Image (tube, rainbow, N blue to C red):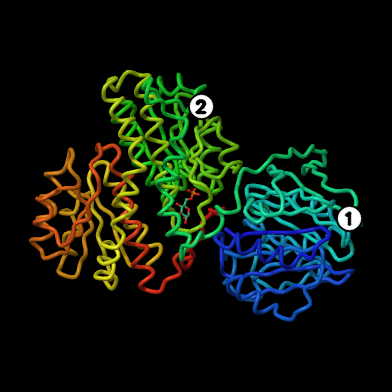
Amino acid sequence: MCGIVAYLGHREAYPILINGLRRLEYRGYDSAGVALINGHDLRIFKCKGKVSDLEAHVQDGNVKGTVGIGHTRWATHGPPNDVNAHPHQGNSGDLALIHNGIIENYAPLKEELIHRGHSFKSDTDTEVLVHLIEDIQFTEKVDLAEAVRLALDSVVGAYAIVVIDRKEPDVMVAARKSSPLVIGIGEQGEHFLASDATPIVEHTKNVVYLEDGEIAVIDRQKGLKIRNIKNQDKTPFIQELEMHLEALEKGGYEHFMLKEIHEQPRSIRDSLRGRMDLINSEVVLGGIRDHEQKFQNAKRILILGCGTSWHAGLVGEYLFEDLARIPVEVEYASEFRYRNPIVGEEDIVIAISQSGETADTLAAIELAKSRGATIIGICNVVGSSIARVTHAGSYTHAGPEIGVASTKAFTAQVTVLTLMALMIGRRKGTISASNFHRLINELDAIPDKVQKVLQSEAQIKYIADIYKDAPNALYLGRGYSFPVALEGALKLKEISYIHAEGYPAAEMKHGPIALIDEAMPVFVVATKGASYEKVVSNIQEVKARKGKIIAIVTEGDTVVKELADHVIEIPETPDQLVPLLSVIPFQLISYHIAVMLGRNVDQPRNLAKSVTVE
Ligand code: G6P
């Protein structure tokens, strides 16, 4: 949600900023802008639209300068237009500021600043912050770094900011609270700043993750200094990035989403690697080993997440109840945080987040933590805020996910949840040794089976072409496949803008069945397993009303083939592992429909990948 990037060093800043913004565009793409200082000259270029629009706007502009900041926006306050685009400036025009987050008390601050003679151009909360800093510089006669510190002391909200001042052209000041900020330390005094490490990795692998309440001052002569809002010095903790540049490229695919769908055999394999011992029949998740006892004794598990991560959590509910016999509640983090939930020391909370930055999930974790619960994270982005505030956790090893619609992160999350439930179930004795052995061997075979499902892409594309113009779609599943139905519907909505609903198959008769006619495609997971016969009956109910059935079936199925309009076969696997296979055709269907409709698959309208506002 808004991407920020900044550079101070010996090279021209503009190409570094533009490349960085391209990497961060998944965070928001309503408008973009840069500010550069050359000598004592500060120039700003900003406009509505994408980073490519900014480049066109800048064409032939004087973008010289070895210090600069850049921003790509996901609008919160004020519509996306040229004026609301970042960077923002104060009255004097000396300062330029970029911001990711929300200043909650911007209205009273703005009113006070207007009384003091400030005039505002935009509708944004951010502009208030830059005026406030400027006002403090002037009234308190302090330098930029101190003015930022004092200003932030009176701000309520979430922010990652970077500010430059043409009066101090060799200084860049950054700060964070609840929104991420990474500092890259390059050679010959070069420093990079960004919302995540993706713009930095091509320049340096040495990074410092700024902590909440910290302010970084980067000075061409003195280098990097970090202090907190109380003005105490902090020692920067430099870490080495494990990210590789190739992971951030499309690798020959037309879209990141397609690449990420096809990466799933690898990403699931990486999420399993080193965690299963097939010979000794063991699962070991090193990150949660210290909390195993607590898990085993847990009277209840709470799973928190948003969007696709919440869907993975629903699969987790079935897994933990089935394999470890622990009752589970799955909560939308945004609901949990505002309803005085009953949670305490006895509870295990599993927080799931691809980005590790989702504001609602982060706030829900803080709430559960303050009430004494043990928080276990399942995150994809190493070093992210959620990964750092949890007591323990297991990373998914999906690698960077750039497409806004989550695909490989979902299957990696489900993989880790399966490992967790198996590990706890085995320790508790709620799974027999033979069943455990069978399941871990089946899990080990999943990456190859995913590869096999991907081979159906041509058939899936053919089906996509038939249904691409449908205005609505229904997704049905039962048991482990119910969350997959929800995820399938979400994927279609997100990237094709076709209205879709996911439903438990048997619930269809309590409402959605009224929608069914010959124009309604109904996507059903009808694999062999516990609820197979029941789902077959549901399919018959749809066919009786002339609905179109696209069914995901187990290889060799003949019964559904007779009833359905189309079947997509997936290899046989136990019920517990079906979501890892059945979601793949749904991802591909959505992808191909969206491409055929000419949608922007990787950057669908109104969405952002990392939602750092509530
Ligand atoms: C956004 C993204 C979704 C994602 C959700 C939760 O809405 O567009 O793809 O599932 O946030 O994000 P998280 O990073 O916490 O998994």
Which residue is found at the position 74% from the left and 63% from the top?
Answer: 69
Q: Which residue is at the front of the view, 607 or 383?
A: 383
Q: Is residue 471 left or right of residue 603?
A: left
Q: Is residue 532 left or right of residue 59?
A: left
Residue 428 falls in which quadrant of the image?
top left
Q: Provide residue 62's location: percent of width, then percent of height.
A: 79, 77
Q: Provide residue 485's location: percent of width, then percent of height.
A: 28, 52
Which residue is found at the position 42% from the left and 71% from the top?
Answer: 599
Q: Is residue 471 visible?
A: yes
Which residue is found at the position 45% from the left and 25% from the top?
Answer: 284
Q: Which residue is at the front of the view, 216 or 23?
A: 23
Q: Is residue 443 left or right of residue 193?
A: left
Residue ID for mark 2 = 286
Residue ID for mark 1 = 143
**Considering the image in quadrants, where does the N terminus appear?**
bottom right
- Other-residue count near label 2 (Cα within 10 Å), few / some / many at <14 / 14–19 / ≥20: few
Q: Which residue is at the front of the view, 450 or 466?
A: 450
